[in-house]
Image: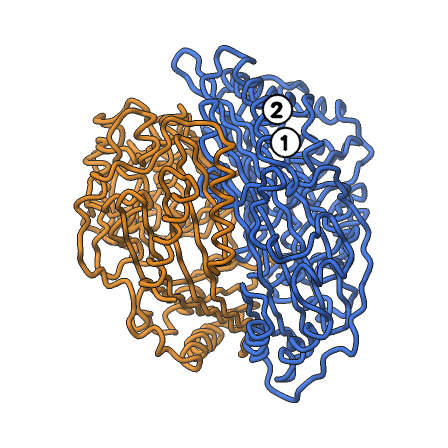
């Protein structure tokens, strides 16, 4: 229930483990030795070959999983390759790479789950894992499906240059452009770092309802950090990009944007003044501010929390929660977005789900278990970090739709308040609904105008209370394509958030208190 | 595979890497086995068993450095993995500071039993595991009819790993951990569901506190949170309870780190030997506490762990500097990876501290927020209790605490006598004067 902090990110990336892809001849992937070529394929036969399995073997594994009377089971195969590169003091000071391979087997009995996984995809290892997961149930044996049928899925992130075919020698020069641009942009920049990551996953999911799906999932993210020094005062800022894109996305223009945004933000912080904290009117800028939705309502609308009675939104479906011009969706179909998925990790289609429509609380985000519990269709939100984790309801891309107000009109309506622009992290306590988001940078609003920059303050509110205090919604909806990662139940998943310029009539802002 | 076999594999991997052209190599091989049971509504909600393997290979090739990981430990695929890792490293640029540590820094490692591995791990039965979770949930549920959600979780694991450096370092370690906890939500009249938990992690099965203790604490805390509100912004005296997340200590530690110092992202740069914090603050590291969660004999650089003083009576005595950043900074390495962190304790309990509080806030938990190592600014969300005349008056939430660590840690006025034992960061409750809190 927390978005990753800058600190966590830096720590993770420092230890990060991933496998460098280099020119194809040096593809750092031991599996390439025995698995068939798969690249960007979405053909089932290629996935069978790649994982060394077939329909009959998967049915046998399912038979073992259901032998104690489970209602349902699924088998999730994953092969992923990840690489990272760090540039510090203008040198590539670290490159890391990793490969991960295995299969997770889940057995569901009612709302109960048994889970096990194996890092060896052999018939014996998979059947042993299946028998372990089967223990959640005790009762009559169930039969596996007669036949597995491929479920075709749409394609939301086809790319030109897949990462597993791009050499590190092609990546480094692109990243050096970011570093060089930051260094040259301003003489006050004393340090810079660039962190780059790419991930490629191939997944194959089969369930006891007879559905089988496969997907190729590319991903990349980049962070540009700049530290500036002036008269002994130091300030740091960063910009990030994250999305399901290939190398072709990193054009000079885009790299320059990342660098100059990091630098401009750092320099501007020299003018930042301490914020007078307390309750105030807050205007949330477009894009990045969507983090407020993620924390204020998103997590509370994940159905598992409601099924378990933990959420403040339990028992509020169908009730008004906001002004009629407020609509909030979770949508995993946005092209190339970091939170997008062609299919969820249970094999269900992803889609646009209205959490709030015209001010009314409408639909929870479901996984298989919660959709059965509530007797509704799954919403394609069953996600997991890897084959080592069981799926749970998770957000994808969460954003508020455009509303009737004009951005300038919104800002000019505030006499004294805060304009919040960019953030590092947020968190929510699901039960009471308290949520926070941490402001990286913003501005004071004085007499309807943005004036002095402010930074490093936490903003705290209560989900339902803040929703009811959204008094104006702009027409400039944007989803910020940054490197957001969401943590829940010990699992991390990529997400994005977005919103139009929005005014909240009162929320508590941290800072100096009088 | 046991650690002896892992050591053989690690040495083999190092040798293969050197054969493939690496100047130096470091290899880590590890395994973990874990079992997790979540119990809710009087039955098992979730049962998970995991076994994970991993091998990490760091290749050093004339200043070029890469770190490569795999979970496939079969020698035939590893051979190819090693060759390609070395081949890939040749494509990197040179960083003159990248090397394995000078072997002289490996010397002096203690050879003592830290008692962090429970010899009885394999004799714990599924029935015992399930019973602990069931008893914990049963008891918690019996405590209040306001409970709307309750679950008890049990987990245990055994962790084994070895580490070999091509220039002479070799180490192996084994440890176990057992956790039991209760998570409970209660309902107030307004639809809010205050939640509280109690969670304990220990090294030995028989050290787990009895199942009822978790519910006793969690339910009491959840019920005491009913009706929580924010109060007026202002400057308040505060007490931070020991079990609250260590957000404020995290903000203190981050700028001590070698990477932040070298990258000019530290507000503590140039402050070594200076009185930066309150005289009451003395922070030490003790890696040798028997059975403690942070105990260990060597750190990820291969440096022997040692007892040390990081802050003494408010004076910053040591930064946390690993081998790589020691080279870049041109200083001696001190070790960047903390084991058990202990504090010089005061004389009074949390209750006594509350009783002598005239007017202020007891912080029982933090939510969100962050800190800026470059400037020292921090801002965190809090939940807690409003205290007046030594008595808890009402629960509060939805407030922020903000400040700058260079000022805030001077405002420390008392340290409790109650180090938190279920974490490697054994912080006691602490009291500060004049903290900036915002609410209404």
Give the residue pinned by disc 1. Answer: A281
Same chain assignment for discs 2 and 1: yes
Spatial distance from mark 2 to mark 1, Cα to Cα? 7 Å
> Residue A203's x, y, as percent?
67, 57
Kindly tell me whether residue A123 is visible in this rendering: yes
Q: Is residue B428 visible?
A: no
Residue at x 62%, y 25% (from the top left corner): A258
Q: Dot 1, crowdedness within 10 Å: few (<14), some or many (≥20)? A: many
Using the image, name the chain to which the residue with label 1 belongs.
Answer: A
Q: Estimate the x, y position of residue B61 in percent, counting from the top left.
A: 41, 35
Q: What element carries label 1?
A: strand
* Disc 2 chain ID: A
Q: Of callouts 2 and 1, which one flags the residue occurring earlier in the amino acid sequence?
A: 1
Report the colour scheme: by chain
Residue A209 sits in quarter: bottom right
Chain A shade: blue
Mark 2 lies on residue: A416
Q: Is mark 2 on a helix, strand or loop?
A: strand
Q: Where in the figure is residue A505, as x and y percent of width and height?
A: 66, 35
């Amino acid at each position: 229930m927390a978005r990753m902090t800058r600190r966590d990110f830096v720590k993770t990336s420092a230890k990060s483990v991933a496998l460098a892809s280099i020119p194809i001849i040096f593809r750092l992937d031991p599996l390439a030795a025995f698995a068939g070529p798969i690249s960007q394929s979405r053909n089932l036969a290629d996935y069978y070959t790649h994982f060394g399995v077939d329909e009959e073997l998967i049915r046998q594994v399912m038979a073992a999983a259901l032998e104690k009377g489970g209602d349902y089971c699924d088998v999730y195969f994953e092969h992923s390759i990840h690489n990272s590169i760090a540039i510090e003091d203008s040198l590539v000071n670290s490159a890391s790479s990793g490969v991960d391979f295995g299969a997770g087997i889940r057995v569901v009995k009612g709302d109960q789950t048994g889970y096990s996984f194996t890092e060896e995809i052999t018939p014996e290892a998979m059947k042993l894992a299946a028998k372990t997961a089967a223990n959640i149930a005790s009762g009559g044996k169930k039969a596996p499906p007669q036949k597995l049928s491929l479920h075709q899925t749409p394609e939301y992130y086809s790319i030109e240059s897949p990462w597993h075919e791009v050499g590190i020698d092609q990546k480094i020069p692109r990243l050096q452009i970011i570093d060089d641009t930051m260094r040259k942009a301003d003489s006050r920049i004393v340090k810079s770092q660039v962190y780059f990551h790419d991930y490629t996953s191939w997944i194959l999911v089969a369930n006891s309802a007879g559905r089988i799906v496969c997907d190729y999932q590319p991903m990349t993210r980049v962070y540009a950090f700049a530290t500036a020094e002036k008269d002994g005062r130091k300030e740091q800022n960063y910009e990030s990009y994250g999305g399901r894109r290939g190398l072709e996305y990193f054009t000079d223009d885009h790299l320059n944007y990342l660098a100059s945004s990091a630098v401009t933000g750092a320099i501007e912080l020299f003018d930042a003044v301490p914020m007078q904290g307390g309750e105030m009117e807050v205007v949330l800028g477009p894009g990045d501010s969507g983090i407020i939705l993620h924390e204020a309502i998103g997590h509370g609308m994940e159905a598992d929390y409601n099924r378990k009675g933990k959420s403040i939104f339990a028992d509020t479906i169908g009730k008004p929660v906001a002004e009629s011009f407020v609509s909030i969706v979770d949508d995993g179909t946005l092209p190339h977005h970091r939170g997008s998925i062609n299919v969820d990790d249970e094999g269900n289609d992803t889609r646009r789900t209205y959490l709030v429509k015209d001010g009314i609380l409408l639909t929870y985000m479901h996984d298989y278990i919660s959709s059965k519990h509530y007797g509704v269709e799954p919403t394609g939100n069953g996600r997991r970090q890897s084959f080592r984790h069981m799926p749970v309801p998770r957000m994808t891309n969460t954003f508020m739709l455009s509303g009737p107000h004009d951005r300038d009109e919104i800002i000019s309506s505030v006499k004294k308040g805060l304009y919040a622009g960019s953030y590092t992290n947020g968190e929510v306590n699901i039960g009471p609904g308290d949520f926070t988001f941490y402001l990286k940078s913003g501005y004071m609003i004085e007499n309807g105008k943005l004036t002095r920059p402010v930074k490093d303050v936490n903003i705290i509110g209560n989900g339902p209370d803040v929703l009811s205090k959204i008094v104006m919604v702009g027409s400039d909806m944007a989803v910020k394509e940054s490197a957001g990662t969401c943590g829940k139940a010990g699992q991390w998943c990529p997400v994005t958030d977005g919103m139009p310029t929005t005014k909240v009539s009162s929320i508590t802002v941290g800072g100096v208190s009088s | 595979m046991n650690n002896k076999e892992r050591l053989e594999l690690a040495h083999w991997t190092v040798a293969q890497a050197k054969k493939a052209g690496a100047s130096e190599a470091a290899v880590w091989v590890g395994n973990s086995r874990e079992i997790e049971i979540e119990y809710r509504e009087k039955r098992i909600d979730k049962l998970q068993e995991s076994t994970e393997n991993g091998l990490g290979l760091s290749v050093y090739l004339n200043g070029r450095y890469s770190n490569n990981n795999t979970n496939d430990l079969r020698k035939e695929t590893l051979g190819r993995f090693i060759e390609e890792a070395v081949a890939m490293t040749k494509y990197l640029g040179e960083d003159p500071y990248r090397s394995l540590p000078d072997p002289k820094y490996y010397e002096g490692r203690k050879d003592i039993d830290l008692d962090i591995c429970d010899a009885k791990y394999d004799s714990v039965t599924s029935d015992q595991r399930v019973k602990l979770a069931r008893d914990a949930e049963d008891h918690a549920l019996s405590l209040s009819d306001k409970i709307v959600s309750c679950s008890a979780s049990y987990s245990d694991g055994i962790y084994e790993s070895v580490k070999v450096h091509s220039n002479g370092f070799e180490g192996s370690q084994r440890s176990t951990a057992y956790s039991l906890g209760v998570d409970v939500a209660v309902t107030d009249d307004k639809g809010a569901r205050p939640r509280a938990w109690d969670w304990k992690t220990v090294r030995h099965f028989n050290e787990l506190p009895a199942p009822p203790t978790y519910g006793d604490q969690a339910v009491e805390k959840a019920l005491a949170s009913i009706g929580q509100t924010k109060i007026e912004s202002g400057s308040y005296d505060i007490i931070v309870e020991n079990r609250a997340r260590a957000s404020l200590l995290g903000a203190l530690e981050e700028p001590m780190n070698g990477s932040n110092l070298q990258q000019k992202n530290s507000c503590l740069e140039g402050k070594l030997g200076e009185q930066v914090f309150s005289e009451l603050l003395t922070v030490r590291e003790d890696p040798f506490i028997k059975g403690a969660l942070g105990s260990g004999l060597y750190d990820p650089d291969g440096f022997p762990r040692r007892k040390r003083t990081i802050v003494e009576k408010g004076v910053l005595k040591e930064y946390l500097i690993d081998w790589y950043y020691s080279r870049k900074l041109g200083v001696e390495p001190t070790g960047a990876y903390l084991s058990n962190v202990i504090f010089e304790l005061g004389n009074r309990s949390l209750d006594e501290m509350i009783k002598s509080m005239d007017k202020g806030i007891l912080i029982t938990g933090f939510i969100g927020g962050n800190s800026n190592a470059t400037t020292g600014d921090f801002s965190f969300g809090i939940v807690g209790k409003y205290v007046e005349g030594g008595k808890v008056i009402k629960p509060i939430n939805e407030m922020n605490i903000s400040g700058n660590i260079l000022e805030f840690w001077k405002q420390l006025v008392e340290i409790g006598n109650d180090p938190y034992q279920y974490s490697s960061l054994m912080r006691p409750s602490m009291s500060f004067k004049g903290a900036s809190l915002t609410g209404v």
